């Protein structure tokens, strides 16, 4: 089935809070602290404004974080790429692939249902 640019569903804050809580309870700890990644509007629009792009596919990735001189942990990240109506990633030499978003923590914003203050500085 082809993509048409309307994929995805808006959810309630309650549903989103439950999902982020499940993620935190399941995956954080043992040195892993990253619970969100921020990408700027301009970078997202750079992807979306590419010819034939109908949306963005987000791949889960891992980034090595040094805990101390003798140990490191793989923390979570996202890799974003444009996708076409025929469901293919846009991977040409001139296409945009986005990474290096701003991690939370350290830049998380104020406490809210998706980002409770008890976890703001994990």
Image (cartoon, rainbow, N blue to C red):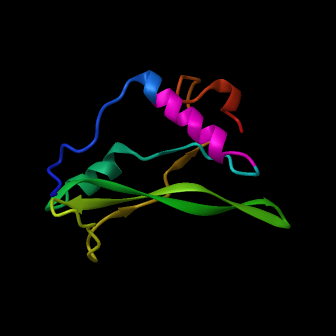
- At 70% across and 35% down in the image, what residue appears? 121
Q: Residue 71, how many percent across, how many down?
A: 81, 64
x then y, percent, for residue 56: 30, 53
86 relative to 48, above or below: below
**Residue, far front:** 1
108 vs 80, left or right, is: right
Residue 76: image location, x then y, percent: 58, 54
Rendered-image quadrant of the C terminus: top right
Residue 58 in sight here: yes
Dominant secondary-structure state across the stretch colored magenta: helix
94 is higher (above) or lower (below) than 114? below
Q: Position of residue 13 (x, y in %)?
A: 43, 23
Which image quadrant: the N terminus? bottom left
Instruction: Say which residue appears at 68% left-offset and 32% top-offset.
Output: 119
Using the rendered image of the protein, determine whether residue 108 is visible from the camera's viewpoint: no
The number of callouts visible is 0
In magenta segment, residue 122: no
| Residue 113 position (above or below residue 104) | above
Q: Which residues are magenta?
A: 16-29
Whether 23 is among the magenta residues is yes
Residue at x-position 53% and y-position 55%: 77
């Amino acid at each position: 089935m082809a993509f048409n640019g309307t994929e995805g569903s808006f959810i309630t804050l309650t549903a989103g809070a439950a999902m982020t809580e499940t993620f935190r309870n399941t995956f954080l700890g043992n040195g892993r602290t990253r619970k969100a990644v921020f990408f700027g509007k301009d970078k997202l629009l750079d992807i979306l404004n590419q010819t034939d792009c109908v949306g963005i596919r987000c791949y889960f990735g891992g980034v090595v974080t040094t805990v101390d001189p003798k140990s490191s942990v793989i923390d979570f990240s996202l890799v974003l790429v444009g996708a076409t109506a025929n469901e293919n990633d846009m991977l040409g030499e001139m296409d945009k692939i986005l990474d290096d978003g701003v991690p939370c923590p350290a830049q998380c914003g104020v406490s809210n249902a998706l980002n409770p203050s008890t976890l703001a500085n994990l």
